[in-house]
Amino acid sequence: MTKDEEYLNLLAIFHYIVAALGALFACFPILHLVIGLTLLFAPDSPGGPGGPGGIPKAFAVIFIVFPLVFILAGWTFAGLLAYAGMSLKQRTRHTFCLVMAALACMFFPFGTVLGVFTIIMLVKPEVKELFGVAEAQATPAGVAPAPGGPGGDGGDGIDRSGRRAD
């Protein structure tokens, strides 16, 4: 096993750890969700939602919707980060792993460190080879190279610097 393979295996493990931390942190808004549900389903009494002098039900709905969005977004991020760890371990989905590494940089401080080290590893040509990613060709697909080859005059008697080739 090469050093790059060892590093990729370590990065995969750290992806699982940061994903677990992300899922845990995503659970924090559950307290707000419970408060919103309590406000929404509390009996209509003075001071209760919808009661005389009480808070509007829309306030309770806000306390339900926003925490739900944050919880689901956090759990989705954690799941995708764990999936990226699995992909690193299997040496598949190079582009997906690169994108998740960039997104992990937003999860300060652990995700930032993990994302930067993952990006550094994934852009190495040796690691791309482990993933089976071919290096990009010099000419885009479907575009023929210029006549006369690189640095040639292109067949019109004028070199690429704009001077006449005599």
Image: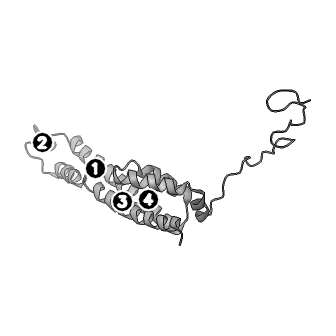
Q: Would you name the residue on which mark 4 appears?
A: 80
Q: Secondary structure at mark 2?
A: loop
Q: Residue furthest front?
A: 166
Q: Secondary structure at mark 3?
A: helix
N-term mark: 1 or 4: 1
N-term mark: 3 or 2: 3
Q: Is residue 129 left or right of residue 81?
A: right
Q: Would you name the residue on which mark 3 appears?
A: 18
Q: Would you name the residue on which mark 1 appears?
A: 67
Disc 1 and disc 2 in contact, CB within 8 angstroms: no
Q: Would you name the residue on which mark 2 appears?
A: 51
Q: Is residue 99 left or right of residue 21?
A: right
Residue 54's quadrant in the figure?
Answer: top left
Q: Residue at x 86, y 37 (%)?
A: 154
Q: Residue at x 14, y 51 (%)?
A: 42
Q: Position of residue 14 (x, y in %)?
A: 39, 63
Q: How many numbered marks are there? A: 4
